[in-house]
Image: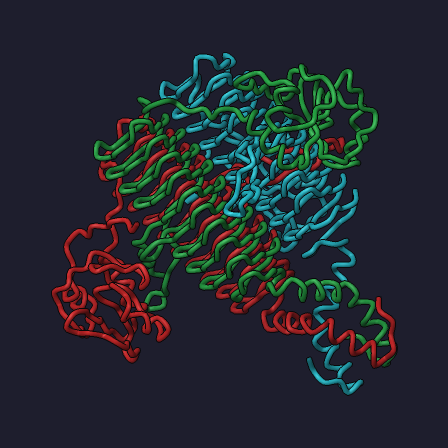
Chain colours: A red, B green, C cyan
Amino acid sequence: MTAQIPPATPHTTGSIAAAIGAQLIGPADLPISTLETLDRAGPTTMTFIRSAAYARDWGSSSAAAALISQGLAIPGHDPARRALLVVPDADLALIKVLGMFEPKPTATPGRHAGAIIDPSAQIAATAQIGAGCVVEAGVTIGEGTVLMTDVTVGADSRIGPACRLHPGVVLYPRTVIGAGGVLHANAVIGADGFGYRPREDGRGLIKIPHIGNVEIGQGVEIGACSCIDRGKFGATVIGDGTKIDNHCQIGHNCRIGRSVIICGMCGMGGSTTIGDGVIIAGHVGVADNLTVGAGARIAAKSAVMQDVPAGESWFGYPAQPAASQMRAVVALRSLPAFMRSVRKALNLREG
Amino acid sequence: MTAQIPPATPHTTGSIAAAIGAQLIGPADLPISTLETLDRAGPTTMTFIRSAAYARDWGSSSAAAALISQGLAIPGHDPARRALLVVPDADLALIKVLGMFEPKPTATPGRHAGAIIDPSAQIAATAQIGAGCVVEAGVTIGEGTVLMTDVTVGADSRIGPACRLHPGVVLYPRTVIGAGGVLHANAVIGADGFGYRPREDGRGLIKIPHIGNVEIGQGVEIGACSCIDRGKFGATVIGDGTKIDNHCQIGHNCRIGRSVIICGMCGMGGSTTIGDGVIIAGHVGVADNLTVGAGARIAAKSAVMQDVPAGESWFGYPAQPAASQMRAVVALRSLPAFMRSVRKALNLREG
Amino acid sequence: MTAQIPPATPHTTGSIAAAIGAQLIGPADLPISTLETLDRAGPTTMTFIRSAAYARDWGSSSAAAALISQGLAIPGHDPARRALLVVPDADLALIKVLGMFEPKPTATPGRHAGAIIDPSAQIAATAQIGAGCVVEAGVTIGEGTVLMTDVTVGADSRIGPACRLHPGVVLYPRTVIGAGGVLHANAVIGADGFGYRPREDGRGLIKIPHIGNVEIGQGVEIGACSCIDRGKFGATVIGDGTKIDNHCQIGHNCRIGRSVIICGMCGMGGSTTIGDGVIIAGHVGVADNLTVGAGARIAAKSAVMQDVPAGESWFGYPAQPAASQMRAVVALRSLPAFMRSVRKALNLREG
């Protein structure tokens, strides 16, 4: 049931080995059509063996070739029939090989007849606007940028060159996206921040207008269904090279630094600052108006409720330095037995 | 303010009782237009009474009829005027009754003029493609499958028969969906996995190409706004009969087994394996590269950070076997008082 | 890189001071084009100074004017050149000023030629239906309501007056939305509830039909990518004036009260009741069939697994009254040291 991925040019074990500088143990003329995992690999596929545990399955696999790191023993290899490509760092080489087999992205070239483009929009000659897209007044779109299908670009937005906006992306008015940005399907950039005040008579809530925008730097990737709210005034800012996974929520007026990694399903409260190079694992929440210092690391599911100093690793609910939190977790697991022992020793009653 | 749901054929208390094999206590000729909760039911609606607490309200309700389990006493029932339908298992019978009243799904029959379909796509004669849909090159779509509005199907995707893709669904290229699949609105299947490596000069991040795809088995349901990322190489696999709720995130190269239930807002890290029949409650996170064994159950909000053996129930942050975790929760609640007692007994200072 | 936001009418320090009743310390004729944060403000922008910490930066800022509360000292102010607008409550005044600068929302007036509208739909004369929208049979849409782009409105839905549905919103059939509702981009209202029963032969799962709908009261705001599932039978109800942030999930048959605030990424299990005026912070989960009483407050990341009495503040995993939970958190942090002391004092072995 593997999807057929015809590479742009046919590859062989020899051409791949040459491209990545691998030592080739086996034939150089085996055609390779794609990569697959060991258990699903077929006779024209290459696989990847990371550890001795997987190496054991090489003999029974149908794969034509495998990419491995130096020093990993592969039992049962028959170099007359199949090929091993040996490199110093197979993980690094794998990225290069994946790039060789990466399918060219599909897009309707030019401006699709089914797109609705305001006459005042300035769209570069090489930009592509897919079917069902709507580009409102005053928008500018840079060279080589691709809007897939059903993308809505709100008025006065500015999209740099070489960006890709996948189907269903919505930009509210005045959004700014730097060069090379990738926005995955159904991401929403620039919705109203979530701010209300109790009505003066105490009956209901008054919405706080959000007149700001979202400004995304260069080389940023935003995951599918992720949302970045616009500023109350001023901008919500995402720094250059930052990568945000699917299902994330960035509140109004957040300032996310450069080369930050935010894994899936994280939420940042309003006006929070995340320093450069911070790594945030999945399902983390960071409360409003906090600062996470540059280079900090936050473990999965943490609830950050106070500032995190630069360079520290934090963890927990509420989050605290990871070492303290791990000691608390370990202590908690032994707590029931500890309580029994102590109550017995001290002749204390339960509760 | 109840929406009017005209059933395909008019039902009465008698016709419903006959269809589900219920004992009828009351008139057989009362017309029933829909089901409603007890407090909102009107004179042509049937309601459902699960427990004695609700049975007390039967007298003051306007409902024409109620579905109940044998043995449940209903005070104040007047069989001259209203009807009770008594069955061995009212929960089970309710499913049948709901099916009788289920509105026929709406869809534009055939191919809507406003859909954009690549000439190379192979679409079965009875498939329906709604307004605003885009079907790219090389796609195949099976008999009876319905694409509602604004669905994007990426190149070389294969959708089986009898599927329903709700509005705004996005399939990235090469996605495979088995027979009978239901994808709810704005779900995104096949976006890039979230993988980066530090650049060799330490300045910024390099994106790892993801050349794989997503393969969804037969009879799978995927909730609204849920995302399944495609494999780095090879496929992210969802097994037959598995049900995934709204707002879930399945990472690249996950292998989700058959008849798995994943409730809302769960996230699975990359390359994680979930065994057949596993049940995962809401807001759970499972870290990368783990295995949750067949038949395991994971309680809501758990953070699974190690493998879970088959058949076990786990819970907590970090998750551990549920019984241990519950003992720890109970112990923690009594910890402040315990500490005071012990400090007093031992004459220890605080902190 | 600030987006230009031309106000409808030009404002000056004097006109703004008059509008909000501020004491003006400085020139009345400085033109103000927008608001900005202190560090990004330019010569025609006004800023907002909340505290002494920010007041220190006034001297080095380029802003033309600042809004401040009475009693806050602003060192280095030169009233010949720049203006301070002094009010009793700057937070409250800020909302008024933001309203003065709020850009008019953009929308295609009338019915866009690219919209697909069923002839049986009843659309008020002043309603606007944007490009790519699909309005199915039997729908009613009230005066002044705006459907932006690519909105799908399922059959027999009823949308009140003065609503705004942002791009990509999907309403399943029979959805009801009261006057003044705002639904942000890619929100999904009325998808099937998540309910299955094991097949009688134990092999696989049977889907429970959901024949109900979603009924949203007046003045409700629903965030981007949020989902509200329809009832199994009867309605999932959202009360008047309630505000739900991005990425929330409301299960089938929930009853959410009036003026409730639900922050981002929260999930409510099926048939749960949330009382009037409840405030729920981000990333909270509430399990099925529970009741959270009116006026209760739930802290971020809590997992509510039992009923919460009206007016109480709860917190934790599992959630309990906040005061107890805070004592437990504090006790847990000192637990490792406490265990060491007690083991030493009692001569107990570890583990």
Q: Quadrant of residue C223?
A: top right
In this picture, is A239 found above or below B320?
above
In this picture, is A90 found above or below C1?
below
Q: Quadrant of residue C215?
A: top right
Where is residue C302 shown, x and y percent of the image?
Answer: 66, 52
Residue at the far bottom in the pictured view: C347
Number of numbered discs visible in the structure rendering = 0
In this picture, is A184 found above or below C23?
below
Q: Quadrant of the N terminus of chain C?
A: top left
Residue plotted at (49% across, 39% down) = B224
Query: Along the line of sight, which residue is nearer the eye, C157 or A44?
Result: A44
Residue at the far left in the pictured view: A29
Query: Along the line of sight, which residue is nearer the eye, A290 or C145?
Result: C145
In this picture, is A232 found above or below C128?
below
Residue A46 in view, yes or no: yes
Where is residue C160 shown, x and y percent of the image?
Answer: 58, 20
Where is residue C294 shown, x and y percent of the image?
Answer: 76, 39
Residue plotted at (59% across, 73% down) = A323
Query: Along the line of sight, which residue is nearer the eye, A31 or A258?
Result: A31
Query: Along the line of sight, which residue is nearer the eye, A122 or B182?
Result: B182
Where is residue A303 shown, x and y percent of the image?
Answer: 61, 58
Residue A255 in view, yes or no: no
Left or right: C89, with B111 as reference point? right
